[in-house]
Amino acid sequence: MAMIDTRYETHEHDVIVVGAGGAGIRAAIEAAEQGLRVALVCKSLLGKAHTVMAEGGIAAAMGNVDPADNWQVHFMDTMKGGKFLNNWRMAQIHAQEAPDRIRELELWGAVFDRTPDGKILQRPFGGHTYRRLCHVGDRTGLEIIRTLQDKAVHTPNIDVFMECTISHLIKNGDEVTAAFGYWRETGKFVLFKAKAVVLATGGIGKAFKVTSNSWEYTGDGHVLAYDVGADLIDMEFVQFHPTGMVWPPGVAGLLVTEAVRGEGGILTNSKGERFMEKYDPARMELSTRDIVAKSIYTEVKEGRGSPHGGVFLDVSHRGADYVKRRLPSMYHQFKELADVDITTGPMEVGPTTHYVMGGVKVDPETAQSTVPGLFAAGEVAGGMHGANRLGGNSLSDLLVFGRRAGMGAATYAKGVASIPAVDEAAVQRAIAEMVEPFERKGENPYTIHQELQMMMQANVGIVRIDADLRKAIEQLKRIQERAKTTSISGSVTYNPGWHLAKDLKTMATISEAVARCALQRTESRGGHTRLDYAEYDPYWSTVNSIVRKNADGSMEVTTAPLPVMPEELKKLFEEEKR
């Protein structure tokens, strides 16, 4: 084996933002505009983010199409969608501030579809009372990331570091003061020293076999926070988007935007039945994602699925011109990848692992975690969406709380006189952990990753039972031990096996958090369905799940009481019932 260079380069900034999707870029812009020096570090390329996958629209109570819409209705929809496990204050801030974030994007150059009188057009989406989703055809996320990226590169004080994986956070006493990682191209190590760190790393989807997520989504931020003592919240709640592609196999799981249903798409089974009439006759295809996903799962399980194990989604009745104009990406995606013309016939779709509602527990006002100096926003942060996220809320979430995380980190950093010293022993431990796979004989990480994905899909997937969850936890113990003994050949340069060896340990840890929280919650709610506990339980309506790392390295899973909603907000729901 060639000798590995264990030296590392060092960079110093006031604030480090890890992740460059919508939440990360928005946080970086905010901190930089406070006059601070910001490092924006991303695992992939700037602009290559899962924000782009949120194609259907961004939710904000603008009232442009339905004047009766307001933040109170958006707040209630979000709480109801999340089965009231949301942090009420996060849901309130989100509903109140989302319209301002849309107007801000527009000022920065975003070009939204318009109403005839020139206002931003809004479309319906599942779980939203009114037409609330501002959109750019079915390429909304792309327009948002383009706008934010353009703003960021023209904002002074932001240094962008691409294709750099952060593998460890470093603490000085109780505070996070640095992020350690490596350049994916060369394998050389790098240390970013700072006064505050913002995590905006996205989700965990690559722990599952069928997912809309790409290779970056390995739970990095969740585990970075967990490893330095931050609490995670509600990790059992994984959203299976109802509509992913099911054919051909090479693209199974690729997202089919909810905008297809928002524009009138109809779901049918192999008998031609519009089956959502059975499961949610009031909202039909525009029911919440958890209900639609479980409905599709049930139809397939009971033998009424499409030829490739999904159901049919048809929007062709809207007419070819309309479909191509309103859903250009979906038209192109199915034509190119599946040789299906969605203007003339149905597409086959099925549930795909898409989003995790759980994440780093944060303060609603500042986005700070339970560890000083560490902040989180976007999908890596928990609390905002409760048990189930409404479509379109993720984009406004990342703008609202990306901004707040940037503000919170900037305020914190301004209170730190100088960049703190870094624990050199902790850096050396991180380096030793990273080079270990080259120094031993063991398993191929790809083999273990495949087993992890299949096991999570089978035992901790869209429906769960006690025996499967216990089996998953036992298997995860073995997978975690095997992940510690993976063996890599070659050098650190251009070595994807080495990258996976690191990611594998992260995915095994976050998978344990999901499985243990799912075992603990003995009820069905939102994105968590227990066949052996099919109903709501009053007790589980009052607590969130909490995950933290014990001093001995073991995982503790417990609960914490839900924050109490103030009376004036409770009255909104009481008045609605009258």
Image (cartoon, rainbow, N blue to C red):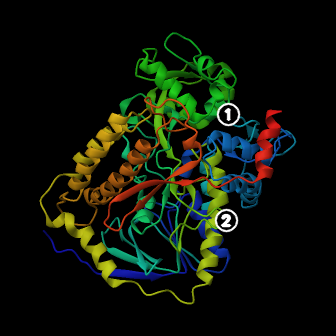
Residue found at the far front of this picture: 539
In the image, what residue occupies the spot 71% across and 52% down?
565
How far apart are the two marked residues, 1 and 2, measured between alpha carbons? 40 Å
Instruction: Say few, some or many: other residues with alpha carbon within 10 Å of mark 1 (under 14 / 14 to 19 / 20 or more).
Output: few
The label nearer to you, 1 versus 2, is 2
- Quadrant of the snapshot with the C terminus: top right
Question: Does residue 86 lie above or below 551 as drawn?
Answer: above
Residue 137 visible here: no
Say which element carries label 1. helix
Identify the disc placed on residue 29.
none
Residue at image mark 1: 325
Say which element carries label 2. loop
Q: Position of residue 394 (x, y in %)?
A: 61, 49
- Quadrant of the snapshot with the N terminus: bottom left
Q: Position of residue 393 (x, y in %)?
A: 64, 47
Rendered image quadrant of residue 2: bottom left
Question: Does residue 566 lie above or below 127 as drawn?
Answer: below
Q: Identify which amino acid the numbered label 2 is placed on.
A: Glu
Residue found at the far top of this picture: 271
In the image, what residue occupies the spot 25% across and 56% down?
497
- Contact? badges 1 and 2 (CB < 8 Å): no
Q: Identify which amino acid the numbered label 1 is placed on.
A: Arg
| Viewer-closest of 356 and 519 | 519
Residue 272 visible here: yes
Q: Position of residue 472 (x, y in %)?
A: 31, 42
Residue at image mark 2: 365
Residue found at the far bottom of this picture: 417
